[in-house]
Image (cartoon, helix red, strand yellow):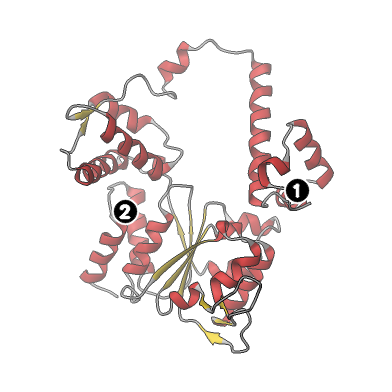
Amino acid sequence: MPGTDADDAVRTAFRIVGASAAFCALGALIERITRSDAPVLVEGETGSGKEVAARAIHYGGARHAEPFVPINCGALPDQLFEAELFGHERGAYTDARERRHGLVAEADRGTLFLDEVDALTPKAQVALLRFLQDQRYRPLGSARERHGDVRVIAASNRPLQAMAAAGAFRQDLLYRLNVLHLPLPPLRARSGDVALLAHHFAERYARKYGGTPKGFDAATRAWMASYAWPGNIRELENWVHRQVLLCDGPLIVRDGPAPHAPEFEAALPLPNYREARARALEDFERDFLLRALKAARGNVSSAAQLVGKERRAFGKLLKKHAIDRAAWFGSGGP
């Protein structure tokens, strides 16, 4: 959908707030992607705006008047993925008391957004691949094959190419999803955009609660510009939301230095190097193990394979850090 209307639709859907070189390049790429109907893979850190980018592509394209249907792949149990995606007939399984259309049918002629596609199990990956080959599917319990007409946009906060190389994601499915690639820059790479976004969010929440928009004092602006924002735009929005509610007066003032500020770090006594290194390594290992287990839905064998370790070695690390898989992820899985 070329022309001014398309540009306006993209800006409206994406709520373009930014002026950095990285953001301008992103906006230009989104506008180009809206001109086609091919599958898109959006990759970026948590909180960097993957769903907002997906909506910009949808509402800036030819399918803008049709449904945009998001699905969180990481929240669906393996056994329900096909039923949720393709629907089912009455009696297809124990709890199927009535016929139900799936999300593919709901998104017909529109866009199906697969968020956290990296969390799909091998079985779910096969089902999705089969559908993407020709957009034909069969609802559970149905004898009739149906055709879907959807644009597929997938999002991942982990690099799918690396997962595919490690055997944790199907290479053929990656090829189907990654026709067009949209990498989102983290907020720390968007120089100057933090202040613009902060004012945007401050105005939004002032309107929501019927107050007067607040500004930011000089020290707070300096802190916002120097902070790394590991949670990206979502973290910034939540912080501004909280400050609008809690700060009195016309200016938002952040008390105390930033935790990462050089003057704060310099004031702390330096720990022993070996002790600090050992503690950092322990913290890293524990966090890494938990992330691997989460990605594998608590399955130790799958988690070990995902990170390239023998199951026995992985189990020893779990024991070393006193991680009880069942306590964290339930009793299912080996």
At numbered mark 2, what does the secondary structure look like: helix, strand or loop? helix
Residue kind at label 1, given as amino acid type? Val
What x and y, as percent, mark residue 232?
41, 42
Residue at which label 2 appears: 24
Q: How many marks?
A: 2
Left or right, residue 274 beside residue 216? right
In this view, the residue farthest toward the right is: 312
Q: Residue at x 60, y 67 (%)?
A: 81
Label 2 sits on what residue type? Answer: Cys
Q: Nearer the viewer, residue 190 or 245?
A: 245
Residue at 56% x, 12% y is 270
* Relative image position of residue 125 (x, y in whole percent): 64, 67
Q: CA distance from mark 1 to mark 2?
A: 43 Å
Q: Is residue 189 visible?
A: no
Q: Nearer the viewer, mark 1 or mark 2?
A: 1
Residue 253 position by quadrant: top left
For mark 1, give the secondary structure: helix
Task: Find disc 1 in the rendering and name its residue.
Answer: 300
Quadrant into which the N terminus falls: bottom left
Which residue: 66% across, 61% down? 121
For residue 271, above or below residue 334: above
With 19 as the anchor, is 308 left or right in this view? right
